[in-house]
Image (cartoon, rainbow, N blue to C red):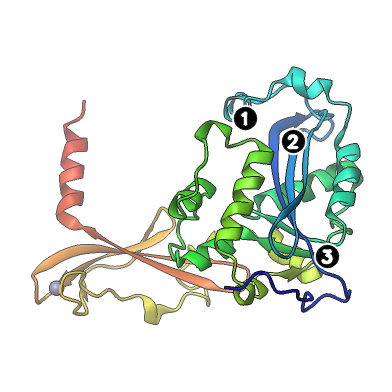
Amino acid sequence: MFIGAKRKYPFSPYAFDMNYIILDLEFNAAFSKHRHRFVNEIIEFGAVKCDEQLNIIDTFSELVNPQISKKLNTHVSALTHITIDELKQSNSTFSHVMSKFRKFLGDGILMTWSNSDILVLLENYRYFYGNDKLMFLKYYVNLQKYCERALGYSDRARQMGLSACAEALGLKFEDNTLHRAYNDAELTAECFKALYDEELLKDFIFECNDDFYRRVSFKNYNICDLRDPLVDRREMFFNCDRCGKRALRRSKWRLKNKSFRAEFRCLRCRRDFEGRITFKKYYDSVAIIKKIVDLSDKEKRYETNKALP
Ligand SMILES: [Zn+2]
């Protein structure tokens, strides 16, 4: 891996070197009296700017004086240790911080851990400016997806957390400094640096066009109707997890907790199990997640439950 090489960003219409801006946000579940609903109001911005050699060349850390709610959600204050008084002392509202951040970002590539921060940024943009797009944004990378791929993490049912990624990479961090925007941004940058791969990164850089906004706003969901054309019935089989032989289905499929379930028997092992299959719809794909649950375990659990008063 050779990071030192000077290169021009391949898709960029510009001829200068690109910076990477890794952003993390803290936000509060704020009740808007005007809109009669909760809004994820941003209360802190933290970001680092890296050059193409991944050296940190600038940093950004700002508290936001909240405009929607002057009350902090207890979960948010417990997690971040930010107090409402600290926020009120900040001279900058969302608009102020945003204009500073836009200057900080410049034409760089914006990166966040998972797309929740960019969704929250969009939500705040919509609330304060009535704008559905971040017009200043040119390129975006979801570093959670990038790091998952780089680490070969393949559990599509569960996303990898930032601290889990940092631990997997042997990065040192203080638990009590996490969940503050700047620290999280810095740790995310370290994960990115540790897993930097120029070729792989190209697959994760999205140009922020209309398709990008459709993609980022798409809510993944589990398909709950077997007649849905996206359900591939040919995938609804199970191989025995002990011997690998195709198991015999012994019941009808039923839906529970958004997964299709049926009883199976391996004729070779004389083993009964429940097969659970989930079809998860992503923006441009369907993931099939299969799980085998031992029937005897389940029966035991059931009996324990029955014994409860
Ligand atoms: Zn078997």
The spot of residue 298 in percent (x, y) is 21, 50
Q: Residue under circle 3? A: 138
Q: Is residue 78 left or right of residue 263?
A: right
**Decide: marks 2, 1 in contact (CB < 8 A)?**
yes
The spot of residue 8 in percent (x, y) is 79, 76
Q: Is residue 194 left or right of residue 73?
A: left
Q: Is residue 113 something one can see in this rendering?
A: no
Work out whether mark 3 precedes mark 1 in sequence or the reverse, and give the earlier one.
1
- Residue type of the residue flagged with mark 1: Thr
What residue is at 73 percent from the left and 41 percent from the top? 46
Of the numbered discs in the image, which one, if any, rests on residue 44? 2
Quadrant hosting residue 136: bottom right
Of the numbered discs in the image, which one, if any, rests on residue 20? none
Q: Residues within 10 Å of mark 3 (few under 14, many from 20)?
A: some
Q: Is residue 64 above or below residue 123?
A: above
What residue is at 20 percent from the left and 77 percent from the top? 244
- Residue type of the residue flagged with mark 2: Glu
Q: Is residue 217 above or below residue 79?
A: below
- Rounded to the nearest angstrom, the CA distance separating label 2 from label 1 is 10 Å
